[in-house]
Amino acid sequence: DAGVIQSPRHEVTEMGQEVTLRCKPISGHNSLFWYRQTMMRGLELLIYFNNNVPIDDSGMPEDRFSAKMPNASFSTLKIQPSEPRDSAVYFCASSRDTRADTQYFGPGTRLTVL
Amino acid sequence: GDSVTQMEGPVTLSEEAFLTINCTYTATGYPSLFWYVQYPGEGLQLLLKATKADDKGSNKGFEATYRKETTSFHLEKGSVQVSDSAVYFCALTASSNTGKLIFGQGTTLQVKP
C-alpha cells in the first residue's frame, strides 16, 4: 500500500512568493492533518479535516496560510505571501478517524523561504 | 486542556545501555496513548500504542505501560543500539474524539557505539 504522499519534497522560494504544498492521504482514511515542525517550536498542528471538512484551524498561524481538501484523496496547504519565518518542514498525516487509530505521516516537505 | 509532557533531551547513551524516556499526560476521559519515532530526514512513524489502563504496548524491543494512576506512559528499552538514535514523541488522543493527537515536545536520543 502506498503511504501518505507529499509533494514537493523540497521547496526553495523567495519572500513574497506563493507556495503550495500537496498531500495525498492513504486511501480509505477520512481524517487529514497538516503539521509544521521547526527547531524552535517543535511539532505544531496547523489544521485538520474530517470527511473533507475543516474541523479545527486554530493552529493556522495567520491569514497568509490556507488549506483545502476538495476531495478525499487530495489536500493543499497554501502560503501567500511567504516569509522567511515560514521556513520549516511541513508534514501531512492521515488516519481512519477511529478513536484509537494511528496517524500515518508523509515524508514531509522542507520549505525554505529566502 | 489535554497535554503531554516529556523529559528534556537530548539523551545520550552508550550502545547496550538501558533507556527510559519519561512521559506524563493530562487528559479528560480515557485517551489512547502513543509513542512515535522520527528518524533523521523522515516523517513520524508509530512505534507503539496502548488504548486502556494497564495495557502494555511493545515493538522492536521498546515497551511502555499505560499507568492511569500516575498518568504516565514511560518508554523503555533494555539495550539500545546506534540505530535507535532518533527523536521520540509521546502523544495522546484528544478528548474531542475526532482523531486529533496531542504531541509532546519530543526527546532526542543519541546512542554512541
Image: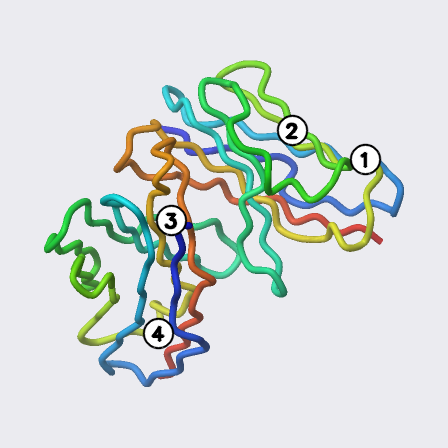
> How many other residues sit within 10 Å of disc 3, few (<14), some (14-19) or many (≥20)?
some
Marks 3/1: CA–CA distance: 30 Å
Marks 2/1: CA–CA distance: 11 Å
Residue A67's disc number: 2
Q: Are marks 4 and 3 in contact (CB under 8 Å)?
A: no
Mark 3 vs mark 2: same chain?
no
Residue A80's disc number: 1
Q: Is residue B61 left or right of residue A64?
A: left
| Local secondary structure at mark 4 | helix
Residue B82's disc number: 4
Mark 2 vs mark 1: same chain?
yes
Q: Is residue B98 left or right of residue B77?
A: right
Labels 4 and 3: the sequence-earlier one: 3
Which quadrant of the figure has residue B86? bottom left
Q: Chain of mark 1?
A: A
Callout in the foreground (4, 1):
1
| Local secondary structure at mark 3 | strand
Mark 4 vs mark 3: same chain?
yes
**Residue marked by disc 3:** B45
| Local secondary structure at mark 2 | strand
The residue type indicated by label 2 comes to Ala
Q: Position of residue B81 (x, y in %)?
A: 29, 73
Quadrant location of the C terminus of chain B in the rendered image: bottom left
Callout in the foreground (4, 2):
2
The residue type indicated by label 4 comes to Val
The residue type indicated by label 3 comes to Gln
